[in-house]
Image (cartoon, rainbow, N blue to C red):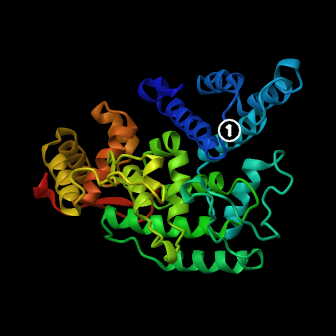
Amino acid sequence: MFLDEYLHIAQPDKHARADAWQVAFGLQAVDGLRPSAYMVETARQHIEGELTDNEVQQRITAYYQTQEGRAEEAGTDEADGASLRIQRLLTDPSFVFSPAGLANIHRHIFSGVLPHAGKFRDYNISKKEWVLENASVNYAPFDWIKRTLEYDFDREKAFSYKHLPLPEVARHMAEFVSGIWQIHPFREGNTRTTAVFTIKYLRSLGLYADNEPFKEHAWYFRNALVRANYENYASHIERTTEFLELFFRNILMGEQNELKSRYTHIRWQGQRPHLAGDGGENTVQSSVQSSVQTGKSSVQIVAWMKQMPGVTAQQLADKLHLTKRAVEKQIAALRAAGVIRRVGPNKGGHWEIIQEETC
């Protein structure tokens, strides 16, 4: 993508800004939108530290008052405004896990773009889906939105991720996120809001996530959500989270499962995608284990964690001369293999070595 070079050579603060902009731009694809070239160039200057958030906002507002801005194709103003707000949310560590927090994310993204930003819908909806051959998911009735969200959030709060292997985390996350999406709390912008909420929630759990799938496969993400919430027994179609699980395994475990929207179509006749490896759970787990056993940097990471249990990913990156992203992928693999676990919160917690002999 157009800002890829920053993800490879930037300092941590620039890297974080570039990552946030990449996700923000990529998510516009779920509604068939794309940012303007002016927005992309402005984002580059923001990443470089040449512009502040407020200056970016002022530039974009002024741009759409010019003749060139008014001549932009339909939707770029929404894409630009939403992208700016998404990158702000993704670089802000604050997060509230509640229906009100979800609504607040929607309000932040679409304030000044949608008149109903941050408000739950007050009518029932249906949407024709290409992946369902123009059928629609059965969304929650509007008068059930608040209590259904509260029920799902309460159940999630009671769920324990302690000692849960990463493949199971991916499976559970697919079920929880698809359930929130199916409620469809908002008239528009539901998928973009769900994506931002998901990224921030994973971070709040201390789960190191690779955001690449959100940047490159936002349309697949939406189609996977659709398939997780559609069933038609007369046509022998059952709801399935398998596609969404592949997406989350790529995020949490660094796998390279193929994410193609055509696979999610209800009439797809070709070979279905398999998990990275040969599609078997044991093979995936053993491949992660193998990478841990043979990776020199993984051995060094475990050694530093043993010496400094409170060490952060950024500190490890500095010590090993790696990018933070590379370290986070190694940590995810070590956790998946059961070599290490996190004790306590992301801030103030520490690492515990479970199977030192594995390394």
In the rendered image, the residue lying farthest to the left is: 357
Answer with left or right where residue 129 lies relative to residue 283.
right
Q: Position of residue 210 (x, y in %)?
A: 42, 45
Answer with left or right where residue 57 lies relative to residue 227.
right
Residue, x 42% and y 52% (percent of image)?
263
The residue beneath circle 1 is 33
Q: Position of residue 252 (x, y in %)?
A: 38, 53
The amino acid pointed to by label 1 is: Leu
Asked if one can make out residue 97 in the rendered structure from this viewpoint, the answer is: no
Q: Indicate whether 36 appears above or below 302.
A: above
Residue, x 22% and y 52% (percent of image)?
288
Q: Position of residue 14 (x, y in %)?
A: 53, 29
Q: Indicate whether 37 appears above or below 118.
A: above
Q: Position of residue 153 (x, y in %)?
A: 59, 74
Determine the image quadrant of residue 282: bottom left
Residue, x 53% and y 60% (percent of image)?
225
